Amino acid sequence: MKKYIGIVGWAFLTAGLVVILGFVGHVQSEKVCLDIKIDIDRSNGNYFVEEEDIFAMVYHEIDTLVGRPISAIETDRLEHKINNHPSVSNTEIYKTVDGLLKIEVAQRTPIVRVFSYSGDSYYIDSTGKVMPRSEKYTSRVFVANGYIYDSFKDISHLNAKMVTDSIQDRILIDDIFTMAEFIRRDPLWRAQIEQLYVNKDFEIELIPRVGNHRIVVGDATDIKKKLDKLKIFYKKGLSMTGWNEYSVINLKFANQVVCKKRM
């Protein structure tokens, strides 16, 4: 008997849910879009995207969005359109039962700004994608410059995070991304290193905030081991001789730090 009552109870509950969902669906199909609300995530501290940018991308559709049955709005198509903005990483659009169309936008997070030898500049974001600079906002990030011949036009289609295991197939921008990402994630080096410079031999040099010297690392291979060596040298070497004793600190060679004294 208890089992029978339980089955009947679940049946009534299921039927009730179906009725409620059907009612909500009917109400939403009749409800028109009353307004559009845009929320831009600024948790990464950047202001590449403003509300007016998003409105501009759907400008020709606003008149037909507001006042249209909200169930007829194609949110997938609008998300795809907004995601074409070069500084947008992801867009989610959803409808509320009170007739609002909410647009939530996440910005891309640049980690390094590259200044090419030709004079143009661009960012590499946290996912390794190349990102164009903005005319109205500049992100305060790690800087890379010097003999970097890769222009934005040449590499805008690449993703530096998809680094191949083959050294022959790796390009300079891969190493710049790898090094910038490592420095960004390490509190010590994030505070100490302010610039990456590519010299005429296409070797990477790091420019510190403290100490008048250049740090030659070559490429991003074994970057952790190289900077671990530098950390030990800072503690046991420069702490004794002074931060301006050497003009060059070379980390390219295995198991040793080669220094050039200042003349």
Image: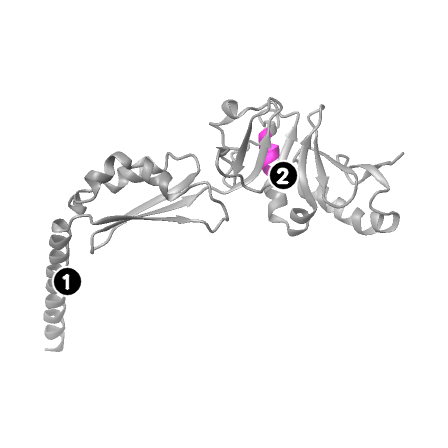
What residue is shown at x 71% (from left), y 23% (from top)? 200
Q: Is residue 178 visible?
A: yes
Residue 17, disc: 1
Does the magenta segment cover residue 175?
yes
Q: Along the horizontal axis of the image, is 97 left or right of 149?
A: left
List the residue tagged with mark 2: 179
- Element at label 1: helix
- Element at label 2: helix
Say which quarter of the image contains residue 139. Answer: top right
Compute the Cα span from label 1 to label 2: 55 Å
Say which quarter of the image contains residue 87. Answer: top left
Q: Residue 246, percent across and down?
A: 84, 39
Question: Pointer 2: residues within 10 angstroms few (<14), some, or many (20+)?
Answer: many
Does the magenta segment cover residue 25?
no
Magenta stretch bounds: 173-179
1 and 2 marks in contact (CB < 8 Å): no
Pointer 1 or 2: first along the chain: 1
Q: Nearer the viewer, residue 31 or 74?
A: 31
Q: Is residue 222 visible?
A: no
Q: Nearer the viewer, residue 92 or 58?
A: 58
Q: Nearer the viewer, residue 20 or 221?
A: 20
Kind of residue sitting beneath label 1: Leu
Q: Along the horizontal axis of the image, is 75 left or right of 167?
A: left
Toward the right, the furthest residue is 263
